[in-house]
Amino acid sequence: MFMASLPGLVIFLLSLVALAIVLVACMFSEKNIYSKQMLEAFECGFSPIGHPHGPLSVQFLLVGILFLIFDIEVIIILPVLFLKVNFLQWVLFWTFYFMIMLWGLLVEVEFGTISWGT
C-alpha cells in the first residue's frame, strides 16, 4: 500500500522543495516591487498626465461583472437546447430560468447597484 502512494509523495515533496527555492530566490533578489520606476506610468515616452493609478469606476466594474455573469449563463444554457425533452419540461425550465434572472435584476435595482446616475 505504501509503494502505491510513493510516486504521489515524491511529487508532493519535490513541489514543496521547488516552492521553497522560488520563495528564497524572491526574498534575496535585488528587484524591488515598490521601486520608483514600477510606480510610474508608462506612456510611450510622454510625461504622464495626472496620477497614474487613478480610481476605477464602479460602473465599469459592474458592467464587466454583469457581462461575465450573463456570458457564463449562456454557456450553461446552450447545451440545454440540444437535450431531448418534452415541451412541458422545456417551458418549465425557461420559465424558472427567466424568473431567476428577473429576481436578480430586481435585487440589483433594489440595492441601487444599477443606478447609473452620478
Image (cartoon, rainbow, N blue to C red):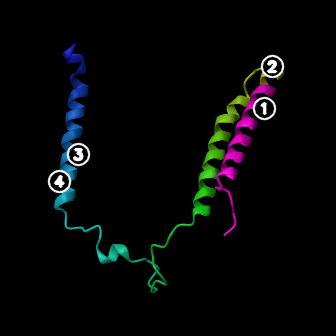
**Image coords of residue 100 (percent x, y):** 70, 37
Q: Secondary structure at mark 1?
A: helix
Residue carrying label 3: 19
Dot 4: within a 10 Å radius of its alpha carbon, few (fewer than 14), some, or many (20 or more) residues? few
Distance (Cα) linking label 4 and label 2: 61 Å
Q: Crowding near pointer 3: few (<14 within 10 Å), some, many (20+)?
A: few
**Alpha carbon of mark 1 to alpha carbon of mark 4: how far?**
56 Å
Q: Which numbered disc flags the more N-terminal residue, 1 or 3?
A: 3
> Residue farthest to the right?
87
Circle 2: element type: loop
Q: Which residues are magenta?
A: 91-118
Q: Earlier in the sequence, mark 4 or mark 2?
A: 4
- Identify residue for label 2: 86
Q: Is residue 60 above or below residue 18?
A: below
Question: Which residue position holds label 1?
Answer: 95
Residue occupying the far bottom of the picture: 47
Identify the mark nearer the N-term, 2 or 1: 2
For residue 24, the mark is 4
